[in-house]
Amino acid sequence: MKNKLKKKIPQEAKLTRESTGVKKIDSMIQGGLPSGSIIGLSGPPGVGKSILSLHFLLEGARKAQKCVYINLEEPRRNINNMIKEFDFADEFFELEKKELIIIKCFDYPEYEKVYTELLQRIKNDPEIKRLVIDSFNCFFSSIDNPHTLTTNINVRKMITDSLYTIRRHELTTLLVLEKSEGHRNGFDYNIPYLVDGIIKLDFLELGTIERRIFIPKMRWTNQHKESKSYEIDKRGILVLEEGE
Amino acid sequence: MVGNIREFILKKFIFPKVLIIDNPGIIISKSFSRYSKKEVNRRIIYYFEDTIVDLQSKTLRELGKQKTEELWYKIGKDIGVEFLSSINMKKIPSWLLNNIIKYTFESLGNTGATVTQKITYKKEGRLILQGTDNIVCRKNSLPALSLGLVGGIMSQLLKTNVEAKTYCKDCPKTCLIIADKNFKQIYTPLIKNHKKIYDYNKLNFPNTNPRLDNIHSLKNLMNFKKISLSNKSDFLGKTITISSLEFFRIIIKYYQKINKMDVLENSLTQTAEKIAKDLLRNEKDLSYKTKFILAMLCSFGWGFPKIKVEKNTITLQFTCIPILKFHSDNTEYLCLIMMAKGYFNQIFNNKFKIKSIKKGQDPASLIIKYQS
């Protein structure tokens, strides 16, 4: 009986991981993000969420993975200006020319239009391995009456559908999550419960500004329990060891 | 075995649970029972241990040991009575008394009163508390505040006047407090029925999410390893403890009564200057120093402070400041105002005086002007 059961249960595939592009963040999560996982990247404005996204895209492209970056708030020139601040800018643009990094800036936040175009791209191009949506909350910012029950249900359905599609194509995804004003706990529609992990960047201004990275949730991972401080300079995000 | 099971059932199902709700500027202690709709919300604030240590030491120099001990015993007892008076307790059945006394003093232990490490209650009405390194008196060997507090709490629990004495040895290694209803009467607080503020709950526990910069909760500071919370909490290496606005109101009341407000003001100001000097030694920029102090006051539960500096005048404005349950005359804020004066003296390297204190349009707002 036991032998019959053993034959029926498929062998568990070994979990592979994708580097975030920042080694010390990888070391906090057993070497990287679980492949095919959807990770929420949260924090207040200006902490470096978009910068971490750039590291993530760059790392994927370096490994010849096709990476897509969707921006729903900024025009293309702003993205370029942001990239140019860093030492890796030349390499980044080079990889973009080789179509290993695809940057798409939508100038309309209506979810239905972006959703269609985005999913079409994903379906048509199975080589895409990494995806960043910056910011995921923008999908829902144009919805009128977000707090009615009907709208709430519809939006939740849209979110779960989109996450399902992304998972089905096994894309390792970063969803940049902006804290929305008026929600004390920060997020709409329980997105943190739906994703596979949360990387939280935060800052404290007690006089001078300090930044810390927290990883409160990461499925299939024994993540580092303590937060780590980090800085941002021309190299991008630099995670510091305690005492540095 | 039976005693342990009983204790387990009482703690798990009967005794009220205490939840600390930590928001930027507003820290609430919520006591609620599983089987009762009644909730008691209390607005709590953090302050530095050294504030009281230094005040007691300076008062000692001014008044001498006996009068200082009498003064602080009364302050402690008034606070002990106030601590439980908001619950409106009925007489506790004798079979439950031991458990309730233990539960109450274990809760007190979370404020740094480590004399409650071992709690023994004897049916004849005697409570014995033992521990080490008790907050405040561990630094100045003046246990009067703790004694009064214990006496006040026991008086409320036993519904009769209880006094407390200390039998400490080798301070602060062996703290021993005995409270007994048969001790000779020292002081019996008067419980007055004051007129309540109509919208106290709305004012003291606002449902607010202010869109302000630089507001932090204790949790933020804990995440950034600036505060560690335990039975001896600390903020950047300096011990802090919790209390309510009532504590400071009582201190002011007594110091006004004995005409020693100058001692109070000088002590609070000087201690705050010393604390600010230590905490801000790595900050050079004036605006950073100011932000630091305002963020600290906010995370300690004092509401949302803002500051405006013009020539030789500082205007400090608080919104959502804690308020008393009963009508007040703003004197309850004097301790905070004096401490803030000390912080500003240090930041601006100046000596400020308190020019004016007034409430804003909202009763939970306070505007203080300092002038050099």
Image (spheres, coloured by chain):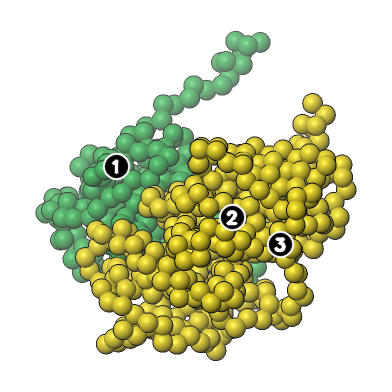
Chain colours: A green, B yellow
Residue under pointer 3? B187
Residue at screen point 68% across, 44% down: B178
Residue A211 seen by the camera: yes
* Disc marking residue B144: 2
Disc 2 marks a residue whose amino acid type is Ala
Q: Chain of mark 2?
A: B
- Please determine if labels 1 and 3 lie on a single subunit: no
Disc 1 marks a residue whose amino acid type is Glu
Q: Secondary structure at mark 3?
A: loop
Q: Nearer the viewer, mark 1 or mark 3?
A: 3
Cα distance, mark 1 to mark 3?
52 Å
User: Observer-nearest residue: B225 or B284?
Assistant: B284
Crowding near the residue tagged with mark 1, few <14, some 14–19, many ≥20 C-alpha atoms within 10 Å: few
Q: Is residue B267 left or right of residue B12?
A: left
User: Which x, y percent locates residue A185?
Assistant: 52, 61
Cα distance, mark 1 to mark 2?
42 Å
Verify CB contact (< 8 Å) between mark 1 and mark 3: no
Answer with the quarter of the image where residue B372 lies: bottom left
For the N terminus of chain B, the image quarter is top right
- Please determine if labels 2 and 3 lie on a single subunit: yes
Q: Is residue A61 above or below residue A30?
A: below
Q: Secondary structure at mark 1?
A: loop
Q: Nearer the viewer, mark 1 or mark 2?
A: 2
Q: Is residue B259 above or below residue A124?
A: below
Residue at screen point 71% across, 47% down: B179
Crowding near the residue tagged with mark 3, few <14, some 14–19, many ≥20 C-alpha atoms within 10 Å: some
- Please determine if labels 1 and 2 lie on a single subunit: no
Residue under pointer 1? A242
User: Which x, y percent locates residue B107?
Assistant: 65, 48
Q: Secondary structure at mark 2?
A: helix
